[in-house]
Image: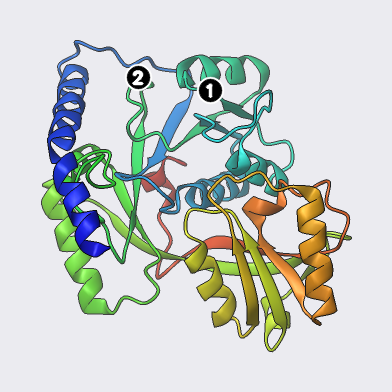
């Protein structure tokens, strides 16, 4: 199977070269002013990555929104809205942010310039966070923050479709800061090596922070009451998830001391059928366990009748948090 995957990647290499050439030409056109970036009337902070898949962009956006609110700012969020249901205003990530920050102004559309103008026409916002916006150069930004998975910063090292990179590591020359996510298991020597590698690609002393996805609490679907994560220790659970990295969710739950009896992992952005989830919750209860899901999945389970638990996850920086001025908040 590994050999077959390797042969497939090798056969896709010419297409990766073409993809990279198009991306390079487009970037050069913006750098030279041949393609014009359009500016909005407020500060724009883009959060993105170099590859596809979950690298912690939305948790970083949530952290930025929370920090902005603490500082008395009026944040809003723009996103493309990938995976959004037909007719829906927000996708799963947007609904998660709305669930955590009631009243947060959000707009989702492929044309984020138009979406930004609509949002600003309706809300008194003074800073906009562009979720998954590193490659969306048509909207001018004041700051670019890039998320990289600390365990595999550049994954396979190949551009799409042979690999999972949208841009080569040299694109970090455009970044203003890098957040290395899922860094909890890295020792100090490995962190120093990661910093040197990132700054080598960026060709300057770029700020680099390390963070991990840390459990915040456990929420009950029946009354939205939250309990400490310690309540999962020794408890039997059945997992339900439709996220980019289900194994990471399961590892977190196991790390909290819970006993996982089963994990129903669906593809990212899967649309859950309420009757199916109710059946899973009843089956878990018959086994003396609880159905446990992610906060991203919980936003799609409003029609589910049976009670279940939600593990809420947040971004926790290892060491000092970024100064507001370095992430566009001052």
Callout 2 environment at 10 Å: few (<14), some (14 to 19), or many (20+)? Answer: some
Mark before the other along the chain sequence, 2 or 1: 1
Mark closer to the observer (2, 1): 1
Do we see residue 171 in this rendering? yes
Mark identifier at residue 138: 2
Return the mark for residue 57. Answer: none
Task: Kindly indicate the quadrant of the structure image that contains residue 139.
Answer: top left
**Relative image position of residue 91 (x, y in whole percent):** 61, 36
Q: Quadrant of residue 291?
A: bottom right
Q: Nearer the viewer, residue 18 or 283?
A: 283
Q: In this view, does 153 lie to the left or right of 78?
A: left
Decide: few, some or many residues near mark 1? Use Cα within 10 Å; few <14, some 14-19, many ≥20.
some
Q: Which of 289 and 188 is in front in this view?
A: 289
Q: Which residue appears at 32% of the width and 31% of the height?
A: 135
Residue 308's image quarter? bottom right
Relative to 252, 4 lies left or right = left
Q: From the top left corner, tell me how far across and down residue 214 is, in percent.
A: 54, 68
Q: What element carries label 1?
A: loop
- Per the rendering, the mark at residue 109 is 1
Picture coordinates of residue 277 (x, y %)? 76, 57
Q: Please report contact status of discs 2 and 1: CB closer than 8 Å, yes or no.
A: no
């Amino acid at each position: 199977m590994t050999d077959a995957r390797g042969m497939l990647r090798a056969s896709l290499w010419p297409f990766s070269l073409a993809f990279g050439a198009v991306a390079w030409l487009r970037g050069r056109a913006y750098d030279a002013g041949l393609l014009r970036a359009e500016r909005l009337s407020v500060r724009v902070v883009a959060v993105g990555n170099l590859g596809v898949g979950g690298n912690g962009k939305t948790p970083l956006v949530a952290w930025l929104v929370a920090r902005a609110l603490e500082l008395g700012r009026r944040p809003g969020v723009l996103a493309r809205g990938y995976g959004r249901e037909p007719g829906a205003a927000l996708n799963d990530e947007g609904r998660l942010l709305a669930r955590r920050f009631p009243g947060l102004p959000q707009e989702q559309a492929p044309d984020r310039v138009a979406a930004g103008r609509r949002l600003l026409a309706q809300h008194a916002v003074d800073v906009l966070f562009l979720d998954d916006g590193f490659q969306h150069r048509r909207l001018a930004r004041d700051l670019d923050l890039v998320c990289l998975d600390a365990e595999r910063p550049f994954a396979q090292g190949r551009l799409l479709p042979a690999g999972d990179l949208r841009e080569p590591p040299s694109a970090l020359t455009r970044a203003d800061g890098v957040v290395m996510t899922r860094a909890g298991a890295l020792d100090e020597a490995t962190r120093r090596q990661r910093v040197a590698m990132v700054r080598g690609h960026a060709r300057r002393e770029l700020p680099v922070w390390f963070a991990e996805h840390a459990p915040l609490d456990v929420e009950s679907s029946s009354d939205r009451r939250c309990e400490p994560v310690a309540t999962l220790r020794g408890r039997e659970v059945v997992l339900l998830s439709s996220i980019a990295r289900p194994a990471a969710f399961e590892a977190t739950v196991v790390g909290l001391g819970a006993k996982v009896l089963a994990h129903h992992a669906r593809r990212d952005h899967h649309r859950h059928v309420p009757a199916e989830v109710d059946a899973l919750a009843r089956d878990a209860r018959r086994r003396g366990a609880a159905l446990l899901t992610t906060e991203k999945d919980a936003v799609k389970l409003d029609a589910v009748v049976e009670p279940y638990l939600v593990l809420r996850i947040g971004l926790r920086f290892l060491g000092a948090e970024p100064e507001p001025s370095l992430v566009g908040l001052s």
